[in-house]
Amino acid sequence: MLYELVLNLQYLEQRFVNRWNYVSDESGVSALGAFGLIQALGLFVEGDPEAFPVGTLGAAIQALLNEQTIFIQTYCKNVYEPLDFYDYAFVDGIVGGVAGIGLSPVMAIGLTSTRTRTDIRRGQKRFGGIDGDFVVNGGQLSAGALTAANAVADRMSEDVSFNNGVSTVNYTPVVVGKEKIVVVDEPTEYRYYETLAEQMDHVALAPVWSPKVTIRTQGSRQYLRGQ
């Protein structure tokens, strides 16, 4: 099974969207696959007071972001099974874990993946909502920023699993190569291949992620563009 996971954030009234892909070792149709991936990655909160599960991707991302960053929603779907999806909305007050003065929305910490096959490019990820203390002279990331970014990279690189009480489902991160669709006088479009079998011929399994050591910029997250 191939899954697409989406995390929606808001920072200074700008919307940030980050996506990941995972493959699972499920066989047959499951209504718990998407739910299980959100649980396995800890992209939800629990307890009183509510918090991300310790040691998960959710907790690592929170520790990377300024407190003005608001967690809005996690959404996961099985790309080829319309009944297998899960939508999790965060309650009010779930925000980034770094107290301080935030940078402009265009500033981001970047992560890149290794290549596990030559016909698929490295994966790229950008996290906006960055605290000012995470950047030092010349745009270098501070030691604290690198520690937080490495924690996110480690969580993004690892296989995860979820036990539903009956069986265990394992998930492996992948970088997806999508089909290029060219139509005259229309913007080029990239989309998943028509069938899972075709798509699995275009996935890079088990990439290892690492942070870039300097701050990045992203024009698409400029004020009034990311709403």
Image (cartoon, rainbow, N blue to C red):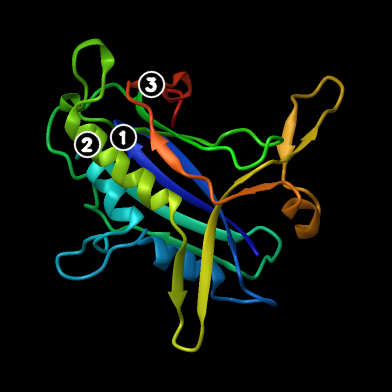
* For marks 3 and 2 on the same chain, the one whose residue lies earlier in the sequence: 2
Residue 74: which quarter of the image? bottom left
Q: Amino acid at mark 3?
A: Arg
Tell me: residue 190, above or below residue 83: above
Residue receiving disc 1: 11
Q: Position of residue 13 (x, y in %)?
A: 33, 32
Name the residue beneath numbered marker 2.
66
**Residue 178, image quadrant:** top right
Q: Which-is-in-front pick, marks 3 and 1? A: 3
- Residue nearest the viewer, comparing 177 with 101: 177
- In space, the residues marked 3 and 2 are separated at their CA atoms by 16 Å
Q: Residue at x 35, y 54 (%)?
A: 57
Say whether disc 3 or disc 1 marks the residue closer to the N-terminus: 1
Left or right of 28? Residue 46 is left
Residue at 29% across, 46% down: 151
Q: Residue at x 25, y 40 (%)?
A: 148
What amino acid is at disc 1? Answer: Tyr
Give coordinates of residue 114: x percent, y percent.
52, 38
The kind of secondary structure element at disc 2 is loop
**What residue is shown with label 3?**
216
Residue type at numbered disc 2: Asn
Q: Residues within 10 Å of mark 1 (few under 14, many from 20)?
A: many
